[in-house]
Image (tube, rainbow, N blue to C red):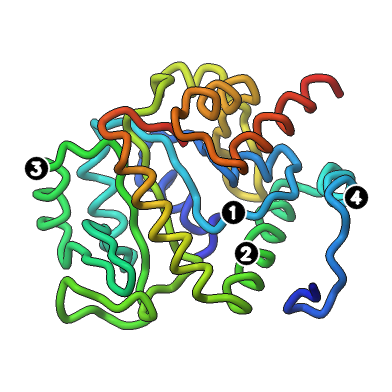
């Protein structure tokens, strides 16, 4: 599924969201390549999001090791895992074939399919929404976090990577344009 | 390095100025195309990306950033 198809599906399911992360940066013309899509959403919509992802053959990752990932095989198991771990972010991937067991070899993952849903960011979702920029595609529109909020989110990271530092520099340069 | 689609990679500033003139749809399409090219060329990098991304997102529980 393409990013556009995914976003369209989320909109159709009446789920509030704001695009953050590398895809947001690309929409602000950054040449940096990301391999996942980060979506900030409300905890209230957790059940709807999990149901939607499983209907679309995406699976929640519950553990990652060097060669294998563990997934929740059903939406119910995914819900249970999130409730138990109280995880503030969840990651989904799609697989090349339907999994028979929770442990899946890394080679079976569709590597370009990673979707991260973030519930607990340093900026509340309502404020992200208020400040967001509306992006219009041919048949859908959605919100992307503002440049200032993207900078704040990156700066809040205690474990900033080299890429984060580059992104902050890039976003700040946009404010001078 | 030559990319999978057999084009020579452009400098970041040139890419930035090209992107500035593209529609949002074109930006998303180009991002996904570039990502797929990289992952096809180096699937091991893609697996490491998933591993590192997961570890990073769960290291700072409960407060995370994008």
Question: In screen coordinates, is A148 left or right of B54?
Answer: right
Marks 4/3: CA–CA distance: 48 Å
Q: Would you call the spot at circle 3 few (<14 residues within 10 Å), some (14-19), or many (20 or more)? A: few
Q: Are marks 2 and 1 on the same chain?
A: no
Q: Nearer the viewer, residue A96 or A2?
A: A96
- The residue to which callout 2 is attached is B35
Q: Nearer the viewer, residue A139 or B34?
A: B34
Position of residue B11 measured from the top left corner of the image (x, y, whole percent): 87, 54
Q: Nearer the viewer, residue A100 or A130?
A: A100
Marks 4/1: CA–CA distance: 18 Å
Question: In screen coordinates, is A40 left or right of B38?
Answer: left
Q: Are marks 4 and 3 on the same chain?
A: no
Position of residue B7 measured from the top left corner of the image (x, y, whole percent): 85, 74
Give the structural element (helix, strand or loop) at label 2: helix
Marks 3/1: CA–CA distance: 30 Å
Tag 4–tag 1 contact (CB < 8 Å): no
* Dot placed on the residue nearer the N-terminal end, 3 or 1: 1
Give the structural element (helix, strand or loop) at label 1: loop
Marks 2/4: CA–CA distance: 18 Å
- The residue to which callout 1 is attached is A34
- The residue to which callout 4 is attached is B14
Tag 2–tag 4 contact (CB < 8 Å): no
Chain letter, disc 4 residue: B
Q: Would you call the spot at circle 4 few (<14 residues within 10 Å), some (14-19), or many (20 or more)? A: few
- The residue to which callout 3 is attached is A84
């Amino acid at each position: 599924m393409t990013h556009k198809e995914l976003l369209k599906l989320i909109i159709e399911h009446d789920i509030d969201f704001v695009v953050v992360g590398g895809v947001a940066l690309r929409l602000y013309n950054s040449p940096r390549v990301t391999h996942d899509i980060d979506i900030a959403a409300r905890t209230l919509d957790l059940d709807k999001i999990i149901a939607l992802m499983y209907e679309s053959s995406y699976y929640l990752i519950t553990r990652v090791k060097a060669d294998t990932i563990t997934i929740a095989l059903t939406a119910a198991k995914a819900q249970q895992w999130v409730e138990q771990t109280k995880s503030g972010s969840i990651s989904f991937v799609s697989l090349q074939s339907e999994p028979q067991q929770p442990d899946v070899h890394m080679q079976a993952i569709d590597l370009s399919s990673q979707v991260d849903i973030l519930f607990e960011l340093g900026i509340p979702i309502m404020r992200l929404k208020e400040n967001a920029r509306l992006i219009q595609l041919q048949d859908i529109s959605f919100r992307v976090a503002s440049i200032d909020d993207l900078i704040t989110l990156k700066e809040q990271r205690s474990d900033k990577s080299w890429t984060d530092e580059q992104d902050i520099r890039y976003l700040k340069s946009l404010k001078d344009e | 390095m030559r990319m999978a689609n057999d084009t020579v990679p452009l400098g970041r500033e040139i890419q930035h100025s090209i992107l500035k003139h593209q529609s949002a749809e074109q930006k998303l399409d180009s991002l996904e195309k570039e990502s797929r090219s990289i992952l096809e060329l180096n699937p091991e990098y893609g697996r490491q990306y998933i591993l590192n991304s997961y570890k990073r997102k769960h290291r700072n529980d409960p407060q995370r950033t994008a």
